[in-house]
Image (tube, grey):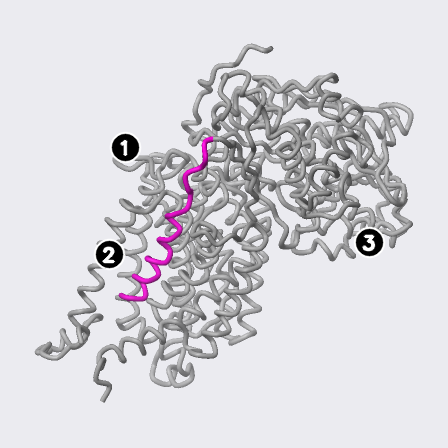
C-alpha cells in the first residue's frame, strides 16, 4: 500500500541504473542513517552502544570484506581473523611510530598492510579452487597467528604480550583509549562503515565488481571473454583483506581498547565472519549487515536482554540458551532460505509491493 | 535495508532497559565465570567457591556489616569479547569490583578501570606489573604473582637438591600455554638461570593443541629435564599429567603453578598421578570451620551449584579465599568511610588497606587455612609465601614448609615493567588517589 512505485517514472538511464531506484527505499535509507547518527547516541545506553552497536558495526565491516571475496568472487577464505589481526597490529605500529598523525588516517591505512598480506596468500587462488583454497588460506590463519604471538616487535615488546591502545584525539575529543566515550567511538566507527559501504557499493556496481561476478559464475567463461584471472582474483583478495584489516584495527582501537590479540584474531573469528556472510547472504552488501546483526548482536541480546526484561536466566544457562537458539535459527534460516537473510528481505519487499492485493 | 533493520534496532533496544535500579540495601558484586567452553573444567570450581562463600556470609551473618551482598555471575566462556561485554554490564549495574578470571580480560580492562574507577582484582594472575600500586592504583593481584611463583619453585627445587649452588648444571623445563599467561614466568626463570647457572627449556603448548601434547612430550623424553614446571590452565593440565605418566616422566618432579593444581587435573592421571605437585597459598579440605559453615548454611539449604564432595577442593578453596578477600575489603571500606553501602571507589580504599592477620583468620574460621595477608598502597600484591602441595592419590596435601619468594629479585622487575607500561601508554594517569593511613 505504502510501498508502491506507481507513478515513479524513470526517464533517464541514470535513474534506471540507480542503486536505490524506488523513492521509498531512499527515504528509508535516510531514516536509518539519521536514526543511527542521532537517535542511537542520544537515546541508547552506554552498554547498548558499546556492547551491541560497536561490535555490530565492526563485524559488518569484516563481513563486507569477506563477502567481496567469497560472495562476489567465489573464493572461500578462512583467513579473515588473521587479516583482521594484521590490520590491528599495523595500526598499532603506525600510531607508535607516528603518534601525531590522526588515528583515523592510520586505521584506514592499516588496511593497506592487510591487503598486501592478503594478496600474498591469495596467489594460490590462481591454481586451487573451492575447499582446497579454503585450506590454503587456513595456512595464512595459522602462520599469521603464530607471528602475532612470537614476534615481540609487533606488540612493542610489551611484557603483557598485548596491544596497549594509547589515547588519540580528534578535534580535542578522545576517540581511542580509555577516556573515549562509547558515543564518540560509535560515531567514528559509523562514519568509517558508512564511507566504506559507499565505496564498496560503487566498486561492486562498476566494472571491477562485474568482473568479479563473472569469475564467480564461471571462471573459464570469464577468461574466454577476456578477463585476466591474475589481476582480478588478486584485486579481490586485496580489497577484501583491506576491509578485514580496517575491521581489525577498528576492533582493537574503537571497541576492545587493547588486549591480547592472539585470542581475538583466532580461527574462531574467521569462522564467525564466514557464518555471518553465509547467513546474511552471499553476494549482498545488505546481507553483511544482517549477518553481523544476527551472529554478533543476537547472542548479546539474548544474554543480557532476557534477564533485563524480567525473564530470569543467569550465567551459564543464558550461554547454553544462546547456543541453542542461535544454532536452531541458523538451521531454520538455511532450510527456509538458503540464500540468506538478504534474500528473505528481498522476498519480503516484493510481497510488500503487491500488498494488500497480491494479484 | 529498512524495516528489518528497524525491528532489529527496536529489539536490541530492549537491552537498554538493562541495569534496573538496585535496592540501596545491598552491595552488588559481579564476577566473570566460565561454566561453558574449553576452560570450564577449571572455571566451574572457581565459580562455585566464591558464590558459596558470599552466599554463606549472607545466610549466616546477613552479609557484611549488616548489608547483604548481591552476587551475580557473568558467563564469558573464557572469551575476551564476552568478557568485555561483562565488564560493561558490571559497570552499568554498579558492581563494586571487577573479577576478570582471564589474563586477556584483565589486560583489556586495566585502562578502562582507571577511568571508570572500578577496582580490578586478579587474584595471583593477570598483569604481574600491576603489583605496583603507585602506577596501577585500581588493580590488585594479591596474594602473589607468577614471578614470585617461579622464584618459589626455584627455592623449593634448591631445597630438594641441597642448596642454591646445586642448581648449577640442572635442566628445568617449562611446559606452558603459548599465550601471555603461560609466558609470564619466562623472564624471571631466565634471569635466575643466569645467576645460578641452570638451563631453562621451553615447551610451549598452543591453545588449540591443549589436548594434543604428544609431540611435545617426545621432546621432553629426549631432553630429560630434571624438573618440569607446568604453567597451564583448563584442559591443558589433565593432559599434561596424563602425558607425563604415559612417557614415564617422574611425576614427583612435575610441579604445577597454582592454576595447574586442580583436583580434576590430578585425578585425570589415575593412581599413578600420586606425587604430582603444585604450588598453593592455602590448604584444602572440609575440616576448616569456614568450609563447615558453607556446608551447613549453603549446601544443606540447596543454595550451591556443586556437589558436597567438591567443597574444599583446591580450586574451590582458592575462590573461597578470594571471597574472603572481597568480603574483608568491603568490611574495611565500610570502616574507612563509615558508610554501610559502599561504592566502587570506597572498595578501592578497602582493598588497599587489606590486612588479614592471624587473629582475623581465626575469627573467619580460616585458622591454618592460609597465612596472613597484607596489601599496601604501593604494593598491591604483597608477594606472599606459598608452599608445594602434593597429590596423594585422592586429595592435595601440604608437602613443604611455607616458602617465601625472592622479593628482592622480583620487585625491581615489577617496578621496571610498571614504569614501562606507563611510558608506552601516553597519557597514563598519574596516581592521584590518596593513601589511607593504616589502622
Label 2 in the same subunit as label 1: yes
For the residues labelled 2 and 1, say whether their Cβ atoms are less than 8 Å apart: no
Image quadrant in which the C terminus of chain A is located: bottom left
Marks 2 and 3, how far apart in space?
Answer: 59 Å
Marker count (numbered): 3
The magenta span reads B1-24
Chain letter for mark 3, please.
B
Q: Position of residue B323 (x, y in %)?
A: 64, 32
Q: Position of residue B403 (x, y in %)?
A: 80, 24
The residue under the point 13% across, 74% down is A15
Question: Is residue B406 among what the camera can see?
Answer: no
Task: Give the residue number, with chain letter if any, for mark 2.
Answer: A33
Q: From this viewpoint, is residue B403 visible?
A: yes
Residue highlighted by disc 1 = A172
Q: Chain of mark 1?
A: A
How far apart in space, not on screen, are marks 2 and 1 (Cα)?
25 Å
Q: Taking A317 as reference, is A252 left or right?
A: left
In-front residue for pair A196/B20: B20
Q: Nearer the viewer, mark 2 or mark 1?
A: 2
The subunit carrying tag 2 is A
> Does dot 3 land on a helix, a strand or a loop?
helix
**Residue at left offset 58%, top offset 23%:** B65
Q: Earlier in the sequence, mark 2 or mark 1?
A: 2
Where residue B82 appears, x then y in whole percent?
51, 49
Tell me where residue A329 appears, x and y as whole percent.
48, 69
Viewed as shown, does residue B411 lie left or right of A325? right
Q: Is residue B3 magenta?
A: yes
- Residue at mark 3: B218
B328 or A148, which is in the foreground? B328
Amino acid at each position: 500500500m505504502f510501498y508502491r512505485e506507481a507513478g515513479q517514472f524513470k526517464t533517464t538511464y541514470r535513474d534506471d541504473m540507480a542503486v536505490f531506484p524506488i523513492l521509498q527505499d531512499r527515504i528509508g535509507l535516510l531514516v536509518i542513517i539519521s536514526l543511527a547518527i542521532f537517535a542511537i547516541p542520544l537515546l541508547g545506553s552506554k552498554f547498548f552502544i558499546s556492547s551491541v552497536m560497536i561490535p555490530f558495526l565492526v563485524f559488518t565491516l569484516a563481513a563486507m570484506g569477506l563477502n567481496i571475496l567469497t560472495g562476489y568472487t567465489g573464493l572461500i577464505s578462512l583467513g579473515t581473523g588473521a587479516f583482521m589481526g594484521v590490520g590491528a597490529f599495523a595500526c598499532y605500529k603506525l600510531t607508535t611510530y607516528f603518534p601525531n598523525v590522526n588515528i583515523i588516517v592510520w586505521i584506514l591505512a592499516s588496511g593497506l598492510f592487510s591487503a598486501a598480506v592478503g594478496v600474498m596468500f591469495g596467489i594460490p587462488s590462481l591454481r586451487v579452487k573451492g575447499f582446497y583454497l579454503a585450506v590454503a588460506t587456513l595456512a595464512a590463519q595459522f602462520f599469521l597467528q603464530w607471528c602475532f604471538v612470537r614476534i615481540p616487535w609487533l606488540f612493542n615488546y610489551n611484557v603483557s604480550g598485548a596491544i596497549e591502545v594509547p589515547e588519540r584525539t580528534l578535534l580535542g575529543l578522545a576517540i581511542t583509549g580509555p577516556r573515549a566515550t562509547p558515543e564518540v567511538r560509535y560515531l567514528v566507527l559509523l562514519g568509517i562503515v558508512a564511507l566504506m559501504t559507499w565505496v564498496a557499493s560503487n566498486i561492486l556496481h562498476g566494472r571491477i565488481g562485474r568482473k568479479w561476478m563473472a569469475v564467480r559464475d564461471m571462471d573459464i567463461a570469464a577468461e574466454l571473454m577476456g578477463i585476466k584471472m591474475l589481476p582480478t582474483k588478486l584485486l579481490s583478495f586485496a580489497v577484501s583483506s583491506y576491509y578485514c584489516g580496517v575491521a581489525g584495527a577498528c576492533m582493537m582501537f574503537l571497541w576492545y581498547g587493547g588486549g591480547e590479540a592472539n585470542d581475538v584474531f583466532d580461527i574462531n573469528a574467521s569462522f564467525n565472519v564466514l557464518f555471518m556472510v553465509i547467513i546474511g547472504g552471499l553476494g549482498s552488501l545488505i546481507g553483511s549487515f544482517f549477518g553481523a546483526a544476527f551472529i554478533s548482536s543476537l547472542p548479546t541480546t539474548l544474554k543480557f536482554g532476557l534477564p533485563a526484561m524480567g525473564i530470569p536466566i543467569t550465567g551459564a544457562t543464558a550461554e547454553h540458551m544462546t547456543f541453542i537458539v542461535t544454532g536452531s535459527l541458523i538451521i531454520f534460516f538455511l532450510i527456509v532460505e538458503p540464500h540468506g537473510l538478504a534474500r528473505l528481505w528481498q522476498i519480503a519487499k516484493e510481497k510488500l509491493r503487491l500488498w494488500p492485493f497480491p494479484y | 535495508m529498512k524495516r528489518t533493520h528497524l525491528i532489529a534496532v527496536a529489539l536490541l533496544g530492549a537491552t537498554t532497559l538493562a541495569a534496573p535500579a538496585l535496592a540501596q540495601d545491598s552491595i552488588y558484586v559481579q564476577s566473570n565465570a566460565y561454566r561453558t567452553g574449553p576452560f570450564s573444567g577449571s572455571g566451574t570450581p572457581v565459580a562455585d567457591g566464591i558464590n558459596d562463600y558470599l552466599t554463606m556470609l549472607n545466610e549466616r551473618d546477613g552479609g557484611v556489616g549488616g548489608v547483604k551482598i548481591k552476587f551475580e555471575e557473568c558467563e564469558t566462556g573464557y572469551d575476551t569479547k564476552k568478557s568485555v561485554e561483562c565488564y560493561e554490564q558490571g559497570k552499568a549495574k554498579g558492581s563494586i569490583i571487577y573479577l576478570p578470571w582471564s589474563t586477556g580480560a584483565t589486560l583489556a580492562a586495566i585502562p578502562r578501570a582507571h577511568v571508570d574507577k572500578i577496582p580490578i582484582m586478579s587474584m595471583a594472575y593477570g598483569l604481574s606489573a600491576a603489583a605496583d600500586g603507585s602506577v596501577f592504583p585500581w588493580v590488585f593481584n594479591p596474594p602473589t604473582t607468577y614471578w614470585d611463583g617461579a622464584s618459589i619453585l626455584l627455592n623449593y627445587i634448591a631445597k630438594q637438591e641441597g642448596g642454591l649452588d646445586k642448581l648449577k648444571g640442572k635442566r628445568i623445563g617449562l611446559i606452558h600455554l603459548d599465550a601471555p599467561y603461560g609466558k609470564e614466568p619466562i623472564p624471571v626463570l631466565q634471569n635466575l638461570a643466569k645467576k645460578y647457572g641452570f638451563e631453562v627449556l621451553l615447551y610451549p603448548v598452543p591453545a588449540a593443541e591443549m589436548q594434543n601434547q604428544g609431540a611435545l612430550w617426545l621432546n621432553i623424553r629426549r631432553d630429560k629435564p630434571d624438573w618440569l614446571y607446568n604453567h597451564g590452565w583448563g584442559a591443558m593440565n589433565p593432559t599434561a599429567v596424563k602425558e607425563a605418566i604415559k612417557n614415564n616422566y617422574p611425576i614427583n618432579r612435575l610441579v604445577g603453578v597454582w592454576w595447574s593444581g586442580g583436583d580434576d587435573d590430578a585425578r585425570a592421571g589415575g593412581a599413578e598421578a600420586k606425587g604430582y605437585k603444585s604450588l598453593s597459598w592455602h590448604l584444602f579440605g572440609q575440616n576448616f570451620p569456614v568450609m563447615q559453615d558453607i556446608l551447613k548454611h549453603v549446601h544443606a539449604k540447596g543454595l550451591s551449584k556443586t556437589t558436597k564432595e567438591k567443597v574444599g577442593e583446591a580450586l574451590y578453596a582458592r575462590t573461597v579465599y578470594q571471597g574472603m578477600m572481597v568480603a574483608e575489603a568491603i568490611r574495611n571500606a565500610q570502616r574507612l568511610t563509615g558508610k554501610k553501602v559502599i561504592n566502587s571507589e570506597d572498595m578501592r580504599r578497602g582493598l588497599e588497606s587489606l590486612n588479614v592477620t592471624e587473629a582475623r583468620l581465626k575469627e573467619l574460621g580460616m585458622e591454618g587455612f592460609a597465612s596472613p595477608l597484607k596489601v599496601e598502597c604501593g604494593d598491591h600484591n604483597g608477594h606472599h609465601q606459598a608452599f608445594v602441595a602434593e597429590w596423594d592419590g585422592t586429595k592435595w596435601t601440604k608437602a613443604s614448609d611455607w616458602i617465601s619468594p625472592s622479593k628482592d629479585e622480583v620487585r625491581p622487575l615489577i617496578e621496571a615493567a610498571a614504569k614501562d607500561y606507563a611510558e608506552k601508554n601516553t597519557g597514563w594517569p598519574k596516581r592521584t588517589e590518596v593513601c589511607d593511613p593504616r589502622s
